[in-house]
Amino acid sequence: MPGVIDAFLDGSNASVRDALHVVPAGEKVRADNLFPSPDVSESEPGDQFCLASLEAVVRMKLVSFRDKDRTHLRDLLELGLVDESWCARLPAALAERLRQLILNPE
């Protein structure tokens, strides 16, 4: 059901802001999202569990494109983990969002 996000809270005093949010693989989080979330095949093994690949995370951030997502993308750009060359890997609408952020980070 698009628009509903499940989250795991750590204790009775936990905040949703600090929760672990669960995003269903291959589904749109919100009905108006341009693309669905990445599939589980876009993951990499971690020490104890699989993690979404960097490319999958970047696409999720570009799809949502809220202020906090743009902040996370700015951090990735500043660290050199993402750059202009990523635009070639992305669908046109997401590449445009990344270019916009690169040209005007604020």
Image (cartoon, helix red, strand yellow):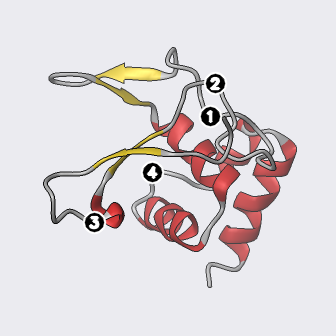
Alpha-carbon span between mark 4 and mark 2: 24 Å
Considering the image in quadrants, where does the C terminus appear? bottom right
According to the image, label 2 marks what residue?
A: 26
- What residue type is disc 1 on? Ser
Between circles 3 and 4, the one closer to the viewer is: 3
Image quadrant holding the N terminus, namely top right
Mark found first going from the N terminus, 2 or 3: 3
Q: Any mark on residue 15, and which? A: 3
Indicate left or right for 103 with 12 as reference. right
The reply, left or right, for residue 46 in relation to residue 87 is left
For marks 4 and 1, the one nearer the N-term is 1
Using the rendered image of the protein, determine whether residue 18 is visible from the camera's viewpoint. Answer: yes
Q: Secondary structure at mark 2?
A: loop
Circles 2 and 3 in contact, beta carbons < 8 Å: no
For residue 37, the mark is 1
Q: Residue at x 54, y 63 (%)?
A: 69
Q: Residue furthest bottom?
A: 106
The residue under label 4 is 81
> Cβ–Cβ below 8 Å for labels 1 and 2?
yes
Whole-percent x, y for residue 97 in the image = 76, 60
